[in-house]
Image (cartoon, rainbow, N blue to C red):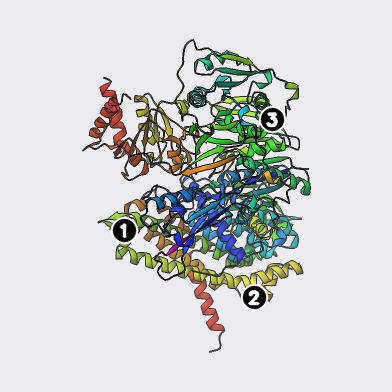
Amino acid sequence: MNYFLTEEQQAVVETAREIAEKKIKPVREKHDAEETFPWEIVEELKKADLFGVYFHSNYGGLGGAGFELVLVVEELSKACGGIALCLAATALGAFPIILFGTPEQKKRWLPDLASGKRLGAFAITEPEAGSDATATKCTAKKDGNFYVLNGVKNFCSNGESAEIYSIFATTDPKRGARGISCFVVEKGTPGFTFGKKETKMGIRASTTYELVFDNCRVPAANMLGKEGYGLFVAQATFDISRPGVAAQALGIGTGAMNEALAYAKVRRQFGQSVLSFPSSQHMVADMATSLEAARALLYSVTRAMDVDLKAAVDASEQSGKTVYEELKRVSSGRWTKYSGMVKLFCSDTSFWVSDSAIQLCGGIGYMRDFPVEKFLRDAKITQIYEGTNQIQRNEIGMMITKELAAKPA
Amino acid sequence: MPNTIFVTKSRCTGCTSCAKACPVSCIDMVDRPKEPGVPWRKLAIIDEAKCIFCNACVEVCDKLAEKSKNKNVFHAITMVKEKVEGKTTVDVSLYKNVWIYAEMRHGKLVPTAFELLGLAKTLAGTLGEKVAAVIIGKDVARHCDELIAHGADIVYVIDHPTLENFVDELYTQALTDLIVKEKPNKLLLPASTIGRSFGSRVAIAANTGITADATELSIDPTTRMLHATRPSFGGNLMATILCEKHRPEMATVRPMAFPRSPREEGRKGQVVSVAVDSARWKQRTRFVRFEAEKGDAQDITSAEIIVAGGRGVGSADGFKPVEELAKALNGTVASSRAAVDAGWIPYRTQVGLTGRTVRPKLYVAAGISGQIQHLAGMSSSEVIVSINKDPECPLNKMATLSIDGDLFEVLPAITAEINRRRGH
Amino acid sequence: MGIHIVVCIKQTPATSNIQIDPVTGTLKREGMAAAINPFDEYGIEEAVRIKERLPGTTVSVITMGPPQAEESLREAIARGADQAFHLTSRAFAGADTWATSYTLFKGIQKIMKEKGPVHLVICGKQTNDGDTGHVGPGIAAWLDWPNIAYVKKVESVDEKEIVVHRMMEDGVDVLEMDLPAVIAVVKEINEPRVAGLKGKMAAKKAVIPKWNEADIEADKKSIGLGGSPTIVSKSFNPPPRKGGVKIDGATAQDKAKALVDKLQEMKLI
């Protein structure tokens, strides 16, 4: 279907597709089996300028926004959702800096993130604080021009591989949700180490680590936004990052369907191709329809968000105010409802489509040396991270209720 | 007037034969404007900018004209070649004898020299001229007897310490000086790394033409010219190349394309020690060292029996039955590009257009479908055996002996059968 | 500092599309796309890698070919080349390797006249349509520069000298060579990158000069078909090798027996 991409967006898609086909497909099985980080693909993405698609040109980026990120992540995920995460998780780590960074902070970190020279990561989850971020136990205690971090973050995507981390810690445990602040912590900062490396069901080409802070002194200049504003930072980040997860999910679902179609077309049973059976065709019809509906929702929401986001980014480069401040000025409201919808719909679709893809292939689809079962394992995480789909439903429901309440009867 | 080629519309039936024959795909089949009484629906259009004026399309169309009962169609393509004026021509009568370059590689005489000597003897026989070998290197005079025994009437020895190892520029200068002085009629080099590297450089320096990688060579008895035929497009098109106005006519010859000339004990020949003026040489390249290929790897190009595995072997472990059969046959293991690209076996075993050319007595292909690029490297093998699950694959179709079946069943069965008959 | 590299490329039919007509056994030409000669892609990549490790290096690309060959030059810019030059004229058509290397030599001289000295010329090992491998060494002969072909590794390079590994049948030669010089590279040398976004944008905008025989001051007697010492006297499709005997048998063992019988008959065992 023609989504009327600009020439630049078309180039983004073609470049990402070429890397997916030529570079990612040959190595995805190995990284999945061995749970290794795809550094050689990071190099390819760097050379192809794909890390920079959603950064302003002042930082060496292409000048795009969320939609360009979505296009890259979708294409890469068609080959491997785990490998795509090296870029997608960097975006999640970069968004707090893009949204809340001062001009100095942006100059410090964004160029390396845009070039891919250093990868980014985002850490909010803790053993006791999953969906409930207000239960954050990791502390940041002010000491002169420094904050001293103590505690543990877990399940950090790009952990250990990344060098620039957006970390959430409580600066005032008494204030609960209003006591959390966000810091940029660089790899190598004394007191910041890596704990357990997780072994996972899917996205095994992505490193997931526990981060350990033991009297880690972080300069006060590394705080994003004001003290106690951490949850705003997190929420505003999720509003624009969830389409990235949705794109990953959509790519995984599409990749699974493509592999299954290729097989079902050549597989012959009862003297005819498996694809030619009406039962197969109905499955394929449902899969393709849902994926296209997911894509249409994802693209239209992201494009609408980008109108505001790009205007805010441009204004911020002029005014020196943060993008978040500018966003509040240009935007009519938060994007929580729609970004939740795309994440929810794309990830649920991805999971059942990947499941159907295996079913369509029959026995071979279940085998590890055939590339379909991996899509299902990779798809699962998209229903969980950056807010489980239960949380998405809560938020969407809450936003709708709020809107109703605001309307005059 | 530049070269011109065009299609006579009324004679073209739109049969697409010319488009299929064109090596540079410069012929498009377009929809023909409707005309009363013309049943043809397509028309050939030639893109002159891409055309290399090789005549392939003209020949195809003319051949169809010969066969056709309808004398109004075919013979539709006209080609007019540019008349070349003033290009210096040499007095070809001054050039005598058929030379071969006897390649030294890391201190060893490469046996391809004997293939070239056999070929040169045939060509020189037609011409009534002599066969000469040129050998370049350090302390190489010791090979003269061997070259004479295999058919050289004259051996030119260019011996100098700086020539110990192959360096393009030095070897070019040494050989070119000799050519200018002695004026050979034909010069054949092996189409090896060394021969292909400096052959073309010598051709430019000696102001003459060269044909690369020839597989068939003959002399036209009337014109006394060398007809060098070579495959291009990975063997899909054969082209016969002439060099009309320059001498020597040069060609690099594909190793293993010709049989070795037999050794004749007591054969007499002349050895000419060539004086070199090394002071004139530009020494801008320095040979540092040679790192020999490690391991017990046998060079597949000299193997008489080869067992090759392709995509069908499925994995590095899948080469086990291939290796076992090779062992039973006293042969060498080779591979197709698919197996090399998958990382199952090293590149040096690769047969084909981007690998090595082999010409063994027996070539056993297991799980190789026979892409044209692979066939280019092994189709001149004497006996080809192909084992493949797909009876329709090109290799099974062209093989001397073909077996439809799973290589993992058939290969061990053959190995067992051979060992049984040998009484193991 | 840095050096100026010229990469010679050719647009050839994309081999990945090569298919054989099942009826005639000949090549199917329909729909064959043109692309950069695959061996030249390694040349472009190596030049760009040298640029990355030797700051201040400029990479130029040059091709001789019909107007549509400009696409391949833009592709080269997308892959990291800085500028491109297109030698195009009806008079260049039909050139053999002698006339092709002469024409490219004149083109390189013109580049030197306009853009300053060239230190290194890189060619692919051979083209996938002609398969000669003669043009690289030929250019070196015309330039009177040293050259090394079949290069599988550039160990080091600076403004004065290049150290390379040459792939031989029996191993690897290591050689040092003064610049300016010419190298021809094999596919083992690198893994070409996917063209980047910035490169693609630059490729769209690039202005590519088109030079004809007069622009490069070429001797008209040395270019094109007329300037070529060799001519193609005839082209033909090779006769297909006749298929042989199919060995049948109920089991793998039966087939193996029948095969070994045949091989013994032929005295191969």
Of labels 2 and 3, the one closer to you:
3
| Residue at the image position 59 percent from the left and 41 percent from the top | C190
The amino acid type of the residue labelled 1 equals: Val
Check the residue under mark 2 and report the chain it is in: A
Q: Please give left or right for residue B257 compared with residue B397 in the image.
A: right
The answer to whether residue A222 of the structure is visible from this angle is yes
Q: Which mark is residue A396?
A: none
Q: Which residue is mark 2?
A: A331
Q: Secondary structure at mark 3?
A: strand
User: In the picture provided, is A314 more to the left or to the right than B257?
Assistant: right
Give the total number of marks visible in the rendering.
3
Q: Please report the bounds of the magenta region as a residue range.
A: B35-43
Give the main secondary structure, helix, strand or loop, of the magenta stretch: loop
Q: Counting other residues with Cα less than 10 Å from the Cα at mark 1, is it few (<14), some (14-19), or many (20 or more)?
A: many
Q: Which residue is mark 1?
A: A274
Q: Against A403, is C153 above or below?
A: above
Task: Provide the residue designation for mark 3.
Answer: C176
Amino acid at circle 2: Ser
Going from N to C along the chain, the mark reached first, 1 or 2, is 1
Q: Are marks 1 and 2 on the same chain?
A: yes
Q: Position of residue C260 (x, y in %)?
A: 28, 28
**Which quadrant of the structure image shows residue C186?**
top right
- The disc labelled 3 sits on which kind of residue? Glu
